[in-house]
Amino acid sequence: MRIPNPTGGDVPALQRIATKARYGRNEMIFGEGDPADYTYKLVSGAVRLCKHMADGRRQIADFVLPGDYFGFAQIGEYSFSAEAVGEVVVLCYPQRQIEALGDENPGIRKQFTTILVKRLLDMQNHIVMLGRKTAKERLVSFLLMLADRSGTAGGIIDVPMSRQDIADYLGLTIETVCRVLSDMKRSRLIDLPNLHQVALRNIDALYALSDGTGEAA
Amino acid sequence: MRIPNPTGGDVPALQRIATKARYGRNEMIFGEGDPADYTYKLVSGAVRLCKHMADGRRQIADFVLPGDYFGFAQIGEYSFSAEAVGEVVVLCYPQRQIEALGDENPGIRKQFTTILVKRLLDMQNHIVMLGRKTAKERLVSFLLMLADRSGTAGGIIDVPMSRQDIADYLGLTIETVCRVLSDMKRSRLIDLPNLHQVALRNIDALYALSDGTGEAA
DNA sequence: CGTGGACTTGACCGATCTCAAAGAAAGTGG
DNA sequence: CCACTTTCTTTGAGATCGGTCAAGTCCACG
């Protein structure tokens, strides 16, 4: 289980070069192709990292939650765009200064490599999900990931993003996301107290459903 | 365009710690969960990196072509299995010795980080493909990637993997892969001189098809 | 040649998408 | 604070792309 770290104290040297910035709902933090001048750390809110196809189709590659870094390790320009899901506060670290810090403090490089490798593992699981899981399995995996990442496993989880965002992350349509959620509510796997919260009713059943173990229903 | 580098001379220090190994068709080089004791570099043949779900569904996360490294930057244990597509020759570098080399020669670490970042970009495109592209767009993207990676862009490309492997990489079934290829042959986009080669007949049309630009046909 | 595995093709099915409309929530301006 | 507008979500009906099941066909290899 990942414990969020919103205060950003893990590497003191980074603190000194950080500036704070705010973004409003759906505001773009950076776009695909922009020069990658900053690395960011999310303080509060949620950010989506997306790729847009020429004809408008959109795929969300990752959601950034408080404590996560994003926009680092890009070569020259960002390979995806970052957009605020709601109101967002971030810390910005100029890339050049991170480089400089890395030269005198190898721990920083190592830390970013660790994050990079972790990201790679997450992406592998995302690939399995998009390539081989059913709509229901995707939704369940998604909810469990949110529960895990927010540390609130077991109870009510916050779902800051819209249904459309969820659809674009899972490779589904918004209608399918709605239908599957309604379905899972009907079968008492979850509750939907409001638009941006989900209560996990039967964690064991959900875990079984997330990978095809367990009943098809 | 990526130029293959099968002879592995890029970092001389690595040469000294390498041992050579061979694997036969469908032989497993390492499995998901095995201790990650070696980094590999592919000399000849092709390798598939796959994740298996509990119920047998399989997703191929990447194909390794000559000159590529694989199995590096794993934390403790491999997060996927690596299997020889056909007859394969690899170079093996003990992880511990790579670590040691990295301490005295930062260039090595840097090189692996570069590879890691490149891999991340490829995975992002894979995610877009699995999440948002049609079967035909996936096949076209796949063929163009093979053309690009093999350096043989423009002509006849080698397709060492089976139809089933292609299906498991693209998140499709083997039947769909066959049907789409036959379709593209009928519409003179490609030729299929034999099972393991594809001739790209109309590169411009293929590029247009790969991202939804261009005609639906 | 004969055999077995890999590939191809066809017919049919079903999960997911598309299109449409109604309902709920969130702004907005008076 | 309310009426209005806009956006987001939910649900339904029908279409479709890709999957499933079932034959064939083609090679590679003994």
Image: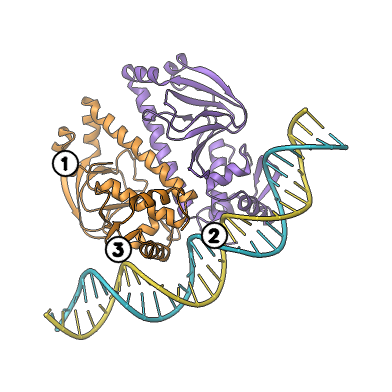
Chain colours: A orange, B purple, C cyan, D yellow
Q: CA distance from mark 1 to mark 2?
A: 45 Å
Amino acid type, mark 3: Leu
Secondary structure under the numbered disc 3 in the rendered image: strand
Report helix, strand or loop for mark 2: loop
Please, is residue A107 above or below residue A210 in the view?
above
Q: Which of label 1 and label 2 is nearer to you? A: 1
Q: Position of residue B70 (x, y in %)?
A: 47, 30
Of the two numbered discs 3 and 2 in the rendering, the one whose residue sits closer to the viewer: 3
Q: Earlier in the sequence, mark 1 or mark 3?
A: 1
Q: Is residue B168 visible?
A: yes
Farthest top residue in view? B16
- Check chain identity for marks 3 and 2: say if they share one: no
State how far apart marks 1 and 3 are (Cα): 38 Å
Question: What residue is disc 2 on?
Answer: B214
Q: Distance between the Cα atoms at labels 3 and 2?
A: 42 Å
Q: Does B103 sit left or right of B217 as displayed?
A: left
Quarter of the rendering containing residue B101: top left
Q: Quadrant of residue A175?
A: bottom left
- Residue under the image location 43 percent in, 59 percent down: A172
- SS type, badge 1: loop
Residue B215 in sight in this render: no
Mark 2 falls within which chain?
B
Confirm whether circles 1 and 2 share one chain. no
Left or right of D30: which side holds B150? left
Residue at the disc numbered 3: A192
Q: Which residue is mark 1?
A: A18
Is the residue B195 above or below the residue B135 in the image? above
Q: Are marks 1 and 3 on the same chain?
A: yes
State which chain disc 3 sits on: A
